[in-house]
Amino acid sequence: MKRLFKNAVINGQRLNLLTEGAYIAYIGEEIPPADELIDLEGKIILPGMIDPHVHVRDLGQSEKEDWHTASQAALKGGVTTLFDMPNTIPPTTNRNALNLKREAARKSAVRYKFNFGVTEHNLREIKEILNERFADIAALKMFLAGSSANEYVEDIDTIRRVFDLSYQFDIPVIIHTEIQKCIEKYASLRPHPGILDHGFIRHRECTNRGTELVIKLAKEIGNPVYIAHTSTAEEVQMIRENKNKARIYCEVTPHHLLLNEHILHTAGNYAKVNPPLRTEADNRALWEAVSDGTVDAVGTDHAPHTLAEKNKPYPRAPSGFPGLETGLPLLLNEVKKGKLSLARLVELYSTRAAEIFGLNDRGNIRTGKKADLVIVDMNKTARVEARNFVSKAKYSPYEGMEIIPVEMTVMDGMIKYLRNQTEQ
Ligand code: DOR
Ligand code: ZN
């Protein structure tokens, strides 16, 4: 099957793109023969988003989200590859749980890989699994603090041994760097907390100390380390200073770029997330780090919970909110506002993740690459309306914010999402 996307804008030029089967076969000014012709009338073709940070849930938490709803939300947000995080029920920290997850993931409408969870007790199992070099394991994921019922690692010796394995097998470790003991210290100072205390309890010092530790060990050991959801000015400064001394990669989420603690006054628990939303000064520092290349990649940290759970009083409301449907559309709107170039955005949401995690067949628009494409019209705008989410989690701290919606998502050369067919 050959499909010709005519009159597209690709890397700033008016061109035609031919897909043949699952691959991009031609990009240029000619009009090669095709079975189907789609006139894009000047819309932009971008590579599909690669999202290394998604909590799909399913299995024991399918009321929050499952592989069907998560992957449909992904398509709507232009995400064609996602990595699922291991803090599921059961946690993906052993072979049985991995196999259960593999079975559930067969429902996925998008490409996926798994991030395998680290605990203080599963290093032997990790080694066995890495020895088998499964193509569906993208990275190891390690939490240094509790967040949504996961196991975390406090023991430095364990962290070192995980880094040794990461070095030996050349597989990145994705790290949530908030430190548990530090959070406990600050939590003890707020015996009756409300949502406005969230940023104090999960204090910036806690993630700063974790990031400092991780950088120090990464410099010693030399393994690839991907620091998840950097949220403070201090973190990105430390990463900036050390990036050329170790294999340190830096992720930022759309919410840590675009939102800050002020939104807690109106969004309440819907904006409760770990690490917390910080200050406007942190937003500015993260944007600076995006501009100067300190930040490598964007991950949505899609973390769905039920509305009933989010409506509980602060201490019992879980952290996290859905992000797959809003991530790329919100950032495209930032391009429109002149905050960053489209070329830089593509690096952040696709190209760098493909490089860091070894997805050589994806990450940019070139002949021979997978035909995983996102088509957008920069002149169309819409607003976030959580009640229309495909995700089961129908709430959002972005409610009402302006986005540039995805018009079409193509995977393997096939049209998997068409905006006007699914929305009024
Ligand atoms: O807010 C968060 N939610 N942060 C995490 O680290 C975990 C996530 C979740 O799984 O709900
Ligand atoms: Zn996460």
Image: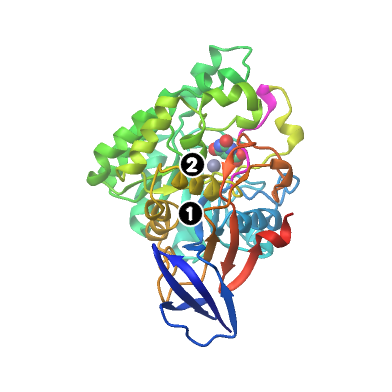
User: Can residue 150 be seen in this snapshot?
Assistant: no
Q: Please name the amino acid that badge 2 sits on.
A: Thr
Q: Where is residue 354 drawn, in percent x and y?
A: 42, 60
Please, which residue is most extreme toward the bottom here? 33
Residue drawn at (58%, 18%) of the image: 196
Residue labelled with disc 1: 126
Question: Which residue occupies 47% across, 51% down?
Answer: 140
Who is closer to the viewer here, 323 or 76?
Answer: 76
Q: Which one is earlier in the sequence, the residue at label 2 or at label 1?
A: 1
Per the rendered image, the range of residues in magenta is: 314-323
Q: Is 119 rendered above or below residue 264? A: below
Count the labels in the image.
2
Circle 2: element type? loop
The quarter of the picture where the N terminus appears is bottom right
Q: Position of residue 208 (x, y in %)?
A: 38, 29
Q: Look at the magenta stretch and give its main secondary structure.
A: loop
Say which residue label 2 marks: 253
